[in-house]
Image (cartoon, grey):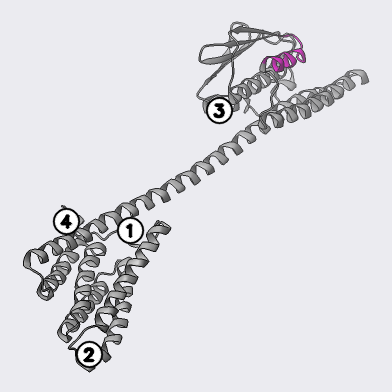
Amino acid sequence: MTRRHWTQWPSREALSREGLTRARRMLTRFVRFCVLAVLVWTAVNQRGVDDWALLLLPVLLIASVAAAWAFFRTTLDHRLWPSLGLLAFLVAVAIFTQWSGFIGPALVLWCGCAVSALERLPLAASVPATAASLTGFALVNNDAWLTTAVIVVGLCLSGYVLRLDAEARGNAQRLLVQERAARAAEAESAALAERSRIAREIHDVLAHSLSAQLVHLEAARLLIERGADRDQILERVVAARGMARDGLSETRQALSALRGDMTPLEDFLRELVASSDGASLSVAGERGPLAAEASQAVRRVAQEALTNVRKHAPGAKTQMRLEYGPVEVALEVRDSGASRPQGELTVSGSGYGLLGMRERAELLGGTLEAGPCEEGFMVTLRVPR
């Protein structure tokens, strides 16, 4: 045993009643009641005792019960010297009762002090206290020396077994508290992750819708500054209104996705391509189930990529390819480069689109690559299925 093992207190969980079953609580109370009954019965039926000792016995009995209760409290608080003082008081009461002729109560007090000290005190303090109590018991007990030795060994084993049992219960209580804390932390982490997911969905939907509206409204502003006719300006305003309507529809779709009710991915991409001029879609690989997060990532990246094509490469042809792999799904969006002159309209936007798409992919354990290709610009997303 190490030095720490000798000086370490039993844990507070082990010394408290926390974690005790109802049956065990009832058994403990029954044992205490039996001990108290034995004390009273042996005292009342004791013969050859002076009257003054009989008068003093109730006071000593009440004092012993109070001292035992205080001993349990001070050991629970890990207060060594008060605990040893109370134990010494109980030993003194045992000595006095034995001297007064009350052999039965003295034996009970000797045994109780020995077992309680071994169960509730650090071993460095409990071993001497137990040895002193059991020595007093051996001197008072009138049985044969072999019987007394067996009883002493049994009391030592009982006290140590109770100590080990209490420590096991205390460890179980600490593990239970840690498990509850871990579950609470896990629930909080899940809530934060869900909030982040909702925030990403709302951001992606609004960013796509508002940036598309901004494209048309910026175009309308440029047309007004250049003195364009009413029909051209109206066309841009109507397009912006259509984008707002589409954004509202996408917001509703995002809310449905958050509830777990999503339209099939390929249908969504076909509708998205159909609403974009010069865009086409091809699907390859073996279809199969796709995780909701992966499906949402593909949807949002497709939306953002097409929005960027409209903003930065007006008039470009766009090829979108969705490929199902054994363990991942890949989306490739390639444009042919701007076919119309780029004006002030192309610099609108915050520039956070690619960063947001890359963060979304990395959160799912995937990758996103974006950069110039042979003719224009290409975005490639790969996420686990």
Which of 49/306 is in front? 49
Determine which residue is flagged by label 4.
3
Q: Amino acid at mark 2?
A: Ala
Give me the C-alpha separation between circle 4 and circle 1: 20 Å
Is 260 displayed left or right of 173 in the figure?
right
Is 76 displayed left or right of 112 in the figure?
right
**Where is 301 relative to 19, above or below?**
above
Determine which residue is flagged by label 2.
53
Which of the two labelled residues, at mark 3 and mark 2, occupies the earlier sequence position? 2
Secondary element at tag 1: helix
Q: Can residue 107 be seen from the camera position used here?
A: yes
Q: Amino acid at mark 4?
A: Arg
Question: How many numbered dots are placed on residues in this image?
Answer: 4
Determine which residue is flagged by label 1.
14
Give me the C-alpha separation between circle 2 and circle 4: 45 Å
Q: Residues within 10 Å of mark 2 (few under 14, many from 20)?
A: some
Give me the C-alpha separation between circle 3 and circle 1: 48 Å
Q: Residue furthest left?
A: 145
What residue range appears in magenta? 266-280
Secondary element at tag 4: helix
Determine which residue is flagged by label 3.
359
Give me the C-alpha separation between circle 4 and circle 3: 53 Å
Q: Residue at x 20, y 68 (%)?
A: 114
Residue 275 included in the magenta stretch of the image: yes
Q: Amino acid at mark 3?
A: Glu
